[in-house]
Image (spheres, helix red, strand yellow):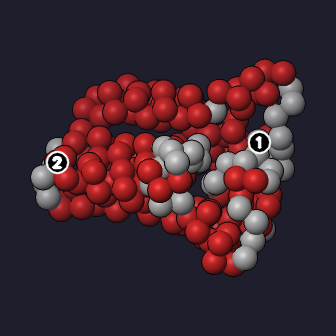
Amino acid sequence: MFWLLLLFSYLLGSVSFAILLSKVTGKTDPRSLGSGNPGATNMMRVAGMRLAVFTLIGDLIKGILPVFIAKQLDFTLEQQAWIGIGAVIGHLYPIYFRFKGGKGVATAAGMVLAVSPIIGMIAIIAWGITFYFTRTSSLSALLALAVMTMISILFEHTILLPILVLCVLILWRHRRNLRDLIAGRERHF
């Protein structure tokens, strides 16, 4: 059952709400404008707040739903985390869109919220505070990852390995943003 749920999680994660919403509403594909990323941040830039919020909600649900199902099936906390990572990998490398997806932050947030609500909320608060002061989405996401990892190290050892894998995946997808942050040319809102 674990492997079936992991496959379901990946397939669900592969659904791109940014792309689907842009098609349904007649907006330009977010992969062709702004950062080229099919996620909530770029949707805000290219399609406005309303579609960005719907994208964010959809991407959060992609991370929450598989973990919720895993909880109902009495999977261990670590198994729940791995199931959630399946959705994040689907978001990053979606089978339906030639394996070219988003950066996975919202889906990862949903996954972490479902696995450990306390860690998830602290990470979201860290993201919010950082964004409030810097107006930089990528920096906010990277600092939230660091906070989430530290809390996992200190208090939730059972999910540390999946959290570290999650961090590597998100960091890899943000490698260009890291270069831009270091060079001082990262986009701000």
Residue 136's disc number = 1
Q: Is residue 176 above or below residue 104?
A: above
Q: Using a 10 Å C-alpha cutoff, classify the residue at mark 1 as few (fewer than 14 neighbours), some (14 to 19) or many (20 or more).
A: some
Residue at image coords 57%, 45%? 100
Residue type at tag 1 = Thr
Q: Is residue 109 above or below residue 177?
A: below
Residue 117 in view in this figure: no
Residue in the foreground of this view, choosing between 149 and 79: 79
Q: Quadrant of residue 182?
A: top right
Q: Is residue 183 above or below residue 30?
A: above
Residue at image coords 68%, 65%? 52
Q: Quadrant of residue 126?
A: top right
Pick out the residue farthest to the right: 185
Judged left or right of residue 132, residue 18 is left
Q: Using a 10 Å C-alpha cutoff, classify the residue at mark 2 as few (fewer than 14 neighbours), some (14 to 19) or many (20 or more).
A: some
Q: Are marks 1 and 2 in contact (CB under 8 Å)?
A: no
Q: Secondary structure at mark 2?
A: helix
Residue 116's disc number = none
First reached walking from the N terminus: tag 1 or tag 2: 2
Residue 82 in view in this figure: yes
Residue at image coords 52%, 48%? 98
Circle 2 residue: 2
Q: Real-space Cα distance between discs 1 and 2? A: 37 Å
Residue in the foreground of this view, choosing between 187 and 157: 187
